[in-house]
Amino acid sequence: MDKKTLITAIASIIAYILLVINTVAGTDFAIPEDILTSIAVLIAAGIMWFISHYWNQDYSLTARKITPVMRKIKKLVKEGDLTLLDAIDNLLEEWGDENDD
């Protein structure tokens, strides 16, 4: 989703909520447009941060088990030992060949 679209959607929701509050409560509560835009930008930034953080982090059980293995592989590769990495590559190739549809 485009950032401008998200900000506009959030500003519209805020404006609608204010309209509902003013109608139900009989008030004349208003927020200036620049403040409404600032609030919408902050909310949109928070939503985008959450989405990017959530999708870039894998909190699944599988990921939690694989992370220490990956760290070990990276350490070995940095030290020049590609044995484990090559073994995993070969295993993935074999598995892929056996399970191709």
Image (cartoon, rainbow, N blue to C red):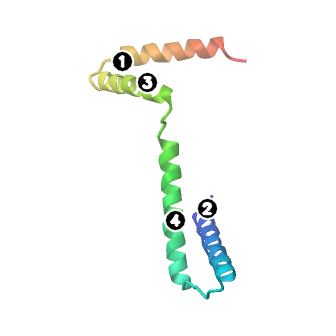
Counting other residues with Cα less than 10 Å from the Cα at mark 3, is it few (<14), some (14-19), or many (20 or more)?
few
Q: Amino acid at mark 4?
A: Ile
Residue 14 at what x, y percent from top left? 60, 73
Looking at the image, is mark 4 or mark 1 nearer the viewer?
4
Looking at the image, is mark 3 or mark 2 nearer the viewer?
3
| 97 vs 29: above or below | above
Mark 2 and mark 1: span between their CA atoms? 42 Å
Q: Could you say which quadrant of the image residue 81 lies in?
A: top left
Q: Earlier in the sequence, mark 2 or mark 1?
A: 2
| 82 vs 8: above or below | above
Mark 2 and mark 4: span between their CA atoms? 14 Å
Q: Could you say which quadrant of the image residue 69 lies in?
A: top left
Q: Residue at x 41, y 19 (%)?
A: 85
Residue 47 at what x, y percent from top left? 53, 58
Return the residue at label 3: 65
Q: Residue furthest bottom?
A: 28
Residue 83 at what x, y percent from top left? 37, 14
Callout 4: SS: helix
Q: Residue at x 55, y 83 (%)?
A: 31
